[in-house]
Amino acid sequence: QVQLVESGGGLVQAGGSLRLSCSASGRIFRINAMGWYRQAPGKQRELVAAITSGSNTNYADSVKGRFTISRDSAKNTVYLQMNTLKPEDTAVYYCNVECDNGLGFVRAYWGQGTQVTVSS
C-alpha cells in the first residue's frame, strides 16, 4: 500500500502565494509521474500540473507562468508553488502519484485533498 499526505493549503488574498506539498510513503519501488489536480464546486476535476520521472513538466494553460511543479525524488515528494493566485484558483487540490512496486504492478494514488481558497 501507498499513502499520500498533502499539506500547504489555506486561505490567501488574490495576488498571494501558497506552496503545496505531497509526500508518498509505503511499498514504493519507483515513482513515475506526479501531478496536481483541482476540483472546484460544481466542476470536474482538472489537471493543474504534472512532472515526469525525468522532470519534464506540463501545465494547464490557466496556470502557466504562475504555478511551478517540482519534485524531490529522494523524499518521494512533489511540490506546487502557486504565485499570483486568483479567486478562480479556489478549489480542492489533489496530488496524484503513479507508483511502481517493482513486481510489475503500477498504480496511481490520490491524496486526500487540500483546500485552497483565494479571496478577492
Image: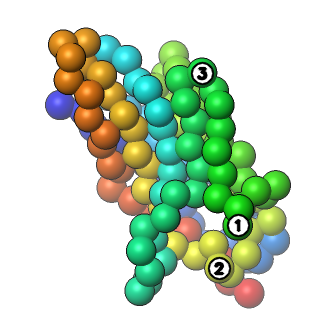
Q: Are marks 2 and 1 in contact (CB under 8 Å)?
A: yes
Q: How many marks?
A: 3
Residue indicated by mark 1: 62
Q: Picture coordinates of residue 105 (x, y %)? A: 20, 23
Q: Nearer the viewer, residue 19 or 63?
A: 63
Q: Is residue 38 above or below residue 53?
A: below
- Of mark 3 and mark 1, the one earlier in the sequence is 3
Q: Which mark is residue 54?
A: 3
* Disc 2 to disc 1, C-alpha distance: 10 Å
Q: Are marks 2 and 3 in contact (CB under 8 Å)?
A: no
* Disc 3 to disc 1, C-alpha distance: 24 Å
Query: Identity of the amino acid at label 3?
Result: Gly
- Of mark 2 and mark 3, the one earlier in the sequence is 3
User: Residue visible at 65% across and 79% down?
Assistant: 88
User: Residue visible at 71% across and 46% down?
Assistant: 68
Query: Identity of the amino acid at label 1?
Result: Ser
Q: Quadrant of residue 79?
A: top right
Q: For the residue labelled by badge 2, is the local secondary structure a helix, a strand or a loop?
A: helix
Q: Which mark is residue 88?
A: 2
* Disc 2 to disc 3, C-alpha distance: 30 Å
Q: Nearer the viewer, residue 95 or 8?
A: 95
Q: For the residue labelled by badge 3, is the local secondary structure a helix, a strand or a loop?
A: loop
Front: mark 2 or 3? 3
Q: Picture coordinates of residue 89 (x, y %)? A: 63, 72
Q: Picture coordinates of residue 3 (x, y %)? A: 27, 37
Q: Is residue 78 above or below residue 106?
A: below
Q: Is residue 109 visible?
A: yes
Q: Is residue 117 visible?
A: no
User: Residue visible at 52% across and 58% down?
Assistant: 47
Q: Picture coordinates of residue 96 (x, y %)? A: 40, 45
